[in-house]
Amino acid sequence: MCQVNRVVDLVPTATSLLERLRVQADRIRQLGSQLAANISSLRSQIDVARDQANLVSISPCVKCRIVDTSTVR
């Protein structure tokens, strides 16, 4: 009988902890979605910056092209 009482006493605590975990999991999912969107935006900005950099003429004798691997050729 003592173990049953102990389990009954623990149920509200366990329920509360599970609810906190659910809330935290929802927050983590939201942060993950925001992070994915931010990374996608940053990749697009890098593409634009690379294209703009490729338009810059360094000198008539030097040909420079920035490629996707972020190297200069």
Image (cartoon, helix red, strand yellow):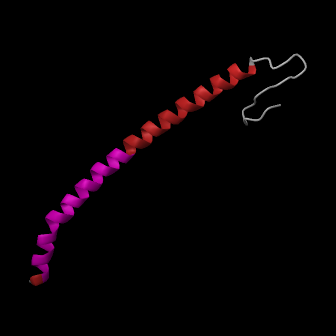
Nearer to me, 54 or 44: 54
Residue found farthest to the front? 59
- In the displayed structure, does residue 73 sit left or right of residue 12? right
Q: How many marks?
A: 0
> Any magenta on residue 72?
no
- In the displayed structure, does residue 21 sit left or right of residue 30? left
> Any magenta on residue 18?
yes
Q: Residue sitting at 39 percent across and 44 percent down?
A: 29
Q: Name the quadrant containing residue 59.
A: top right
- In the displayed structure, does residue 64 sit left or right of residue 4? right
Q: Give the prevailing secondary structure in the magenta stretch.
A: helix
Vertical relation: 10 (above or below) 24? below
Residue found farthest to the right? 61
Measured as percent of width and height from the top left, residue 9 is found at 11, 71
Q: Residue sitting at 82 percent across and 25 percent down?
A: 64
Measured as percent of width and height from the top left, residue 13 is found at 17, 64
Vertical relation: 27 (above or below) 4? above
Nearer to me, 44 or 15: 44
Q: Residue sitting at 31 percent across and 50 percent down?
A: 24
Q: Residue sitting at 9 percent across and 77 percent down?
A: 5
Measured as percent of width and height from the top left, residue 19 is found at 23, 54
Which quadrant holds the C terminus?
top right
Vertical relation: 58 (above or below) 22? above
Measured as percent of width and height from the top left, residue 11 is found at 16, 67
Which quadrant holds the N terminus?
bottom left
- In the displayed structure, does residue 23 sit left or right of residue 69? left
Q: Which residues are magenta?
A: 3-28
Vertical relation: 13 (above or below) 57? below
